[in-house]
Structures are given as C-alpha cells and as structure tokens.
Amino acid sequence: MSKPLLNSLDALRFDHAFVERLPADPRQDNRRRQVRGACYSLVEPTSVREPRLVACSRAMMERLDLDPALCGSDDFVEIFSGNRLLDGMKPHAMCYGGHQFGHWAGQLGDGRAIVLGDVINRAGERWSLQLKGAGPTPYSRTADGLAVLRSSLREFVCSEAMHALGVPTTRALSLVLTGEQVLRDMFYDGNPRHEPGAVVCRVAPSFIRFGNFQILTAQRDEKTLRQLMDYCIETHDADLGPPDPSAYVRWFERVCERSCEMVVHWMRVGFVHGVMNTDNMSIHGLTIDYGPYGFLEPYDEDWTPNTTDAQGRRYRFGNQSKIVLWNLLQLAEAIYPLVGDARPLEDALQNFHDDYARRWRAMMARKLGFEDWTPQLEPLIEALPGLLKRVETDWTLFWRCLARLEEDDKALTDEGLRSLFAPAWYRAEDISGEYLQQLRHWLEAYLSAARELDASRRRSLMNRTNPLYVFRNYLAQEAIDLAEQGDFSRVHELLEVLARPYEEQPGKAHFAGRRPEWARQRAGCSMLSCSS
Ligand code: AMP
Ligand code: MG
C-alpha cells in the first residue's frame, strides 16, 4: 500500500547539496552587483501585501508527496508567495550569463527567481522549488524582480500543459497573486500601466542552464567551473561515473541528446519558444522560461510569436533545431577548459545533426500514423509544408483531421475534402478546386503508403501523437482577461482540459478550435512582447 500523502508542508525534507557544495557569493546584502567566483547568492524573497491563490497543480503536489488539499491553506499561500520560509529552506539566486540573440551578454543570473531549496520525494527524485517574481536579487540589474499575472499565468498553465503533452519541461506548482501592483510597458511604447503582480512556484530537477557554465568560463574561473561540472554529474547524472574529463564528455553527449529530444517534441506539437538564448537552455533538456512563446496556428516555419525578434526571426519555428545546436556549441566552448580536447565535443555536435534527422523523421512518421520511418514517407513529408502553407492551415487541427480520413469513395471528392479539413482551414471560403486537386494528390499518395496499416491502429497512433488541445495564445489571453477581473474559473478549466490534450473531451470544443479572427491582430493573442 502506498503511504498517505503529507498533510503538512513542514513535513517536506530539503537537501542542500547545491548551496553546500558550490561556492557562495560572500556578500549577503541584496544589492545589484557583478558576482565572481560563485555559483549563487543567498537572498530572501520580498514579502508581499495580500497573497491570494489563483491555482495550483494537483499533479505536481502529488509528485512532491503533498496532499493537494493543502493548496487552499494559508500556509501554502504564505510560503509560495515568498512571505514565509519553511525550516530547512535556503533561498538563493543563481549566477549565470548567456548569449542573447547571438551576442554574449555577460552576467545575467536569477534577476527575479529565487530557489527555495531542493525537496527529495519518497521516490528519491530531487525537485528544486523556485519562486519567480518574488522580488529583486543581486542579479536584477535595472529591473524590479517582479512578474505580472499575465506572464505568470502563461508560464504556470503552459508548464503543466507541456508536461501533459509529453514535452520535457520545468513544472509549476502554484500561481499566487501578490496583492501588489507592478508597472509594465507592455508595448514598449512609453505607455506603462499597472498590472497585478504574481508569483509562480516552478519545479524542476534543477534550474541550471548552459549560462551557469558560460559565466564561469568567461571569468576564467576553472576551479568553480569544475566544481559545478562535478556537482552536476554527481547529483543529477551519477550513472556517468566519477567525474573526470571522459565523464564530462559523456555528460555533454547526454545534454546534446536531451536537447535534441526536447526540440523534436517542440516540432511535433508546433511549439515556438521565442527566446532561445543560452541562459534559457536547461542542462536537463527541459523547456524553460516561458516568455513570448506560442503554438503554431496557421502552419508557417518562419513564424515567431516574439515581437522583439520579428525582424531577424532568429528563433522562428523552423530554426529551432539549428539554434539548439548553436547553443550546444556555446556550452561545448564553456566546458572545453575541463575537457582539454576539442575532438570529442566536436563529434558530439556533429552527431546532433544525424540524431536530430533520425528523431525528427521518426516523429513525423508517427504523426502520419506509422510506427517507424520508411523512405517512402520522404516525398510525403517534403511536400507537406508547401501544402499547408498555400492556404492557411492550422498545424494542430490538420493532423486530427488527417487521422479521420477514411478510405472510401466519398472521402476524396471535393465535398469530402471540404468537410474533413474545414476545421483546420482559416479561410475555407478561399479554397479553390485547384488546391483541392493538389491536396487530393497528396492524400492519395498518403493512403497508398498507409495501405498496409491497420486503419484503427493508424488513427490511434496519430491521436496519441497529435494533440487536439494546445495552449493557444488567444486561449491564454481570454483566461488572463478573466483572471485580471478576479475570475479564476477559466484557469482551472484550462488546467483540466490541457491535462488530457490527446483525448476529445465533451463540452470542450471551445478549447479545440482554431484561433478566431478577432484574435489575429490583438496583442497577446498571436504575437507577444518580452514584457513580463
Ligand atoms: P528572460 O529573457 O526572461 O529569460 O530574462 C533574461 C534576464 O533578465 C534574466 O537574467 C532574468 O532574471 C532577468 N529579468 C527578466 N525580467 C526581470 C525582472 N522583472 N526583474 C529582474 N530581472 C529580470
Ligand atoms: Mg531567462
């Protein structure tokens, strides 16, 4: 019989390997500064006026062995707003640097995130609890250390939704309003407004990023760099063996594999991260730092939701694997002083190409309903982008429509195609006979490739690979508008629907539709700024 869940937060057990084994910033005052020779600074969350729970993740509570009923308690809200610390918490902000949009930015660090401590659950898993938006730290530079409800809600819901989609991601435990007002210039146009402040408690094995290594290498601090590397292996990847240069290489290979796996999942579900700077790359291959992200709606490999990147489109959908590789190259350079030999690191990077191509093909095969990739799928997959782009076609819904395709006489008639694909087309009225002919041609080739497959197994594999419900930006914006009015019911409903993204849920059609026309140009509904 499994043990009952913990009914008190005081029963959580913390482990302090990170702060105990790695060097701390000797200063303990909370002033902005350049930190050297340290992996973190001790800093406490700032108290807030009137914390109020918006939502919590039952699934994450249970993962931490906590009774979900605790979410509603005053204790819970006090602790996860940053107002109170539990015995055993050692709050700290991490020091890291990073390349932003391809340029080295120097020290960045947790400017508004504070790790409370690592919980070890009964299964022996390490879960680091981190508050985001809990006040300034030595790394806040010119900003306020706070977060607003709008961006916090987006991060909270999307973390849990991505997990349910099967995409590696940091998790989220809670979303709390602080009762404080925070000034934000959402459009960067000189018209700031007050928005409700919020704090998210994020959860992950660790929040260590590529940038944690990069900053130490930039400071030529090989000693601390080695300590961090050894810590990562011994704490998170102990099966790689005792830390030494060959284990460092194996660790790097593993980071390459995990990052590859992550980006293939992004491509599967149409996720565009939006800000793939090296400080936003987790060493665990987890999607981290949800900012101006988005899910592809009309298919377009050049799309990015981030208005700040609208010119160069560095982080566009179709570029994400290349950027992961570029980021891995920066990580390789950062750990090179420890390895002392460029060859094995170069080999690992070289291998990323083949690994990505292999995983991507396998993923696309499954989207099409095939257990394995076969060369006969190649022309089908190659023709797809042109087909989907010629008329605005929803990336998510296209696959669900395709899964419904039957092999009968009616299916491929003009009428049959119009009725099958109507949910995925943004301008059904513009679909020409010529386009239908092109689509029919593709579908005939598809059905011919699929003729050996059992139809119901094909459909079932497709519907396990291709989600019906994704956290579209306009759905987020609707929930934000309501939450800003004090109505959190939509957040709760979203959490519930998005927890089972592959299953058609009765009465939830609203969450399965394409983006409505009113949302095409509205801020937050398609494109977003970095303001958060
Ligand atoms: P991001 O682009 O959100 O990943 O953030 C890049 C850097 O800016 C990180 O060092 C963040 O901690 C920092 N940052 C972002 N927003 C704030 C804020 N409101 N206050 C302090 N630091 C921030
Ligand atoms: Mg970041």
Image (tube, rainbow, N blue to C red):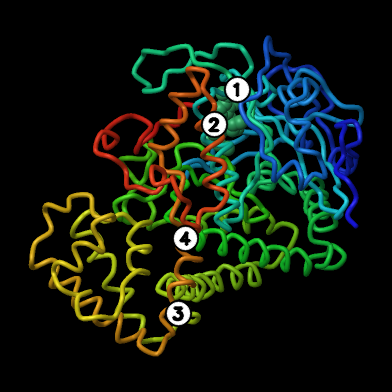
Q: Earlier in the sequence, mark 3 or mark 4?
A: 4
Indicate whether 69 appears above or below 65: above
Q: Is residue 207 visible?
A: no
Q: Tag 3: residue type? A: Phe
Please report contact status of discs 3 and 4: CB closer than 8 Å, yes or no: no
Give how far apart the Cα atoms at labels 4 and 2 are: 27 Å
Disc 2 marks which residue? 153
Q: Earlier in the sequence, mark 2 or mark 3?
A: 2
Disc 3 marks which residue? 370
- The quadrant of the image that shows the N terminus is bottom right
The secondary element bearing badge 4 is classed as helix
Disc 1 marks which residue? 198
The residue located at (63%, 23%) in the rendering is 140
Drawn side of residue 290 relative to residue 529, left or right: right
- How dense is the environment of label 2, judged by Cα within 10 Å: few (below 14), some, or many (20 and up)? many
The quarter holding residue 156 reads top right
- How dense is the environment of label 3, judged by Cα within 10 Å: few (below 14), some, or many (20 and up)? many
Give how far apart the Cα atoms at labels 1 and 3 are: 44 Å
- How dense is the environment of label 4, judged by Cα within 10 Å: few (below 14), some, or many (20 and up)? many
Q: Position of residue 168 (x, y in %)?
A: 61, 55
The secondary element bearing badge 1 is classed as strand
Disc 4 marks which residue? 321
Please report contact status of discs 4 and 1: CB closer than 8 Å, yes or no: no
Indicate whether 178 appears above or below 230: above
Indicate whether 504 appears above or below 409: above
